[in-house]
Image (spheres, rainbow, N blue to C red):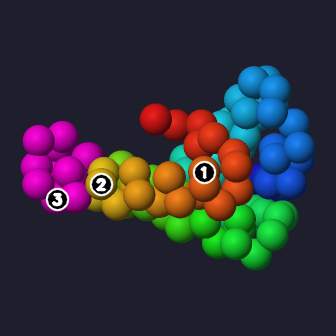
Amino acid sequence: MDPVEINLNEYILNERRGIYSTLGRKIKRVLAAMFRGVHVPTTVKGSKQDVQAFIDTLLKEKKYMVAYLNYGLDDPRTYGSRARLDAAVRSFERTSGITWPFK
């Protein structure tokens, strides 16, 4: 499997819509691999705070998807997972200045 490189500095400097769709595709690829249990070499570059916020948000995105698949959309556990994801997204956006590509 080809490695994935995500350079958060690149997205901070280039606020064009097309470059965000590239970020979305890369994140989608990493999430898909996480669900399949496949290892995809992934490199995330940026400031320490940006990278930590990115990883936290990515993990919460996966947890929300798992809760949705396991319990359905109307379960309190799914609502709680969504609330934690929303908080992580706000933190990532505030820290990095990058809009999270999934809403």
Specify which label sits upstream in the sequence, 2 or 3: 3
Residue 91 visible in the snapshot: yes
**Amino acid type at image mark 3:** Arg
- Would you say residue 24 sits in the magenta stretch? no
Specify which label sits upstream in the sequence, 2 or 1: 2
The image shows residue 5 at horizontal and vertical percentages of 83, 55
Residue drawn where x is 18% and y is 40% of the image: 73
Residue drawn where x is 69% and y is 45% of the image: 98
The image shows residue 41 at horizontal and vertical percentages of 76, 64
Which region shows up in magenta?
Answer: 68-80
From the viewer's perspective, is residue 71 above or below residue 43? above
Specify which label sits upstream in the sequence, 3 or 1: 3
* SS for dot 1: helix
Q: Quadrant of residue 21?
A: top right
Q: CA distance from mark 2 to mark 3?
A: 10 Å
Q: Is residue 73 left or right of residue 27?
A: left
Tell whether label 3 touches label 2 (CB within 8 Å): no
**Amino acid type at image mark 1:** Glu
Per the image, the residue denoted by label 2 is 83
Q: Is residue 57 left or right of residue 29?
A: left
Q: Which mark is residue 77?
A: 3
